[in-house]
Image (tube, rainbow, N blue to C red):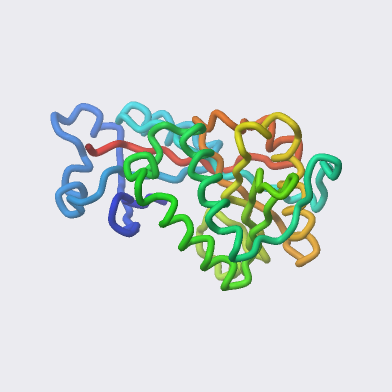
Amino acid sequence: MAAFEGRKPIVPSTVAVTPDVLSLPFSPFEPLQRRYNAADRLTFHIPLNDAVGATLLGRLGFSPESYLAFNQEGSSTSYRVDSFCTIRDATFADIASVSSLHYQHVKDQLATSQFISEPKGAPDILGTTFAQLIENGQGLLVAEHKGTLVGAIQYGSFMMPDDGKVRRLPPGYAGVIEWICVAPESRNAGLGSALVSEAICRLRILGTNYVYVCHGTNNRLSTSCFWNRFNFTPHWVTLEYGLI
């Protein structure tokens, strides 16, 4: 399965690639690039154990950017930092602080993030996103220490249909964790683990069949070891090819 992504909305596409394209004097993706000339990258999602696909895409110039990992065991290690801070549901009054926290977190974890190219507008854009999450009743938790927000995490759930189509997500009631951020001065104290633990607990109460995360391969602030402690196991990998 492939998706052509960029500055415009994602455009689904199917691309057949055979070994002989490696000897072509031009890119086999040039027609797509001409058609979607406002896009900045081409993205492929492949199963983690697809060694042939990964090798072929690597030779074409693709590099791994992220992977999809699942917690399907129904349990996780519990982490608490009650003496350090309080974890609670976010309110509209928290939006500005959460936006600033996440913007700083993204700057620290990935220097090439889309937010860095638009530093003046990024917090406002994030604020609108977080406001919509709260308004729609989706889970947004914050960690508070002495009246100051020092961390946040977003979680949600939805039903994935069992219709026989090939998807990265298995059928069932899916839970997702994203938008994790911790203030620089509060990192390495177990706060991120406590936020993830609380989010998983709430998703299990909702009756989800599994929980998934999409983890950046170059994320300096969390590693595969961090997610392994919660029984997350990688299943899919995303490879990208920069067009500009």
The image quarter in which residue 134 lies: bottom right
Image quadrant occupied by the C terminus: top left
Vertical arrangement, residue 200 with respect to residue 19, above or below: below
Q: In percent of the image, x 71 and y 61: which residue is there?
A: 89
Q: Is residue 24 left or right of residue 152?
A: left
Residue 184: where, in percent of width, then height? 60, 33
Residue 13: where, in percent of width, then height? 32, 56
Residue 81: where, in percent of width, then height? 82, 41
Q: In percent of the image, x 79 and y 55: which residue is there?
A: 201
Name the one closer to the observer, 123 or 32.
Answer: 123
- Counting labels gives 0
Q: In percent of the image, x 71 and y 50: which residue is there?
A: 147
Residue 226: where, in percent of width, then height? 69, 33
Q: In percent of the image, x 21 and y 40: which residue is there?
A: 28
Name the one closer to the observer, 154 or 60.
Answer: 154
Residue furthest to the front in view is 147
Name the one closer to the observer, 212 or 28.
Answer: 212
Q: Is residue 202 left or right of residue 63?
A: right
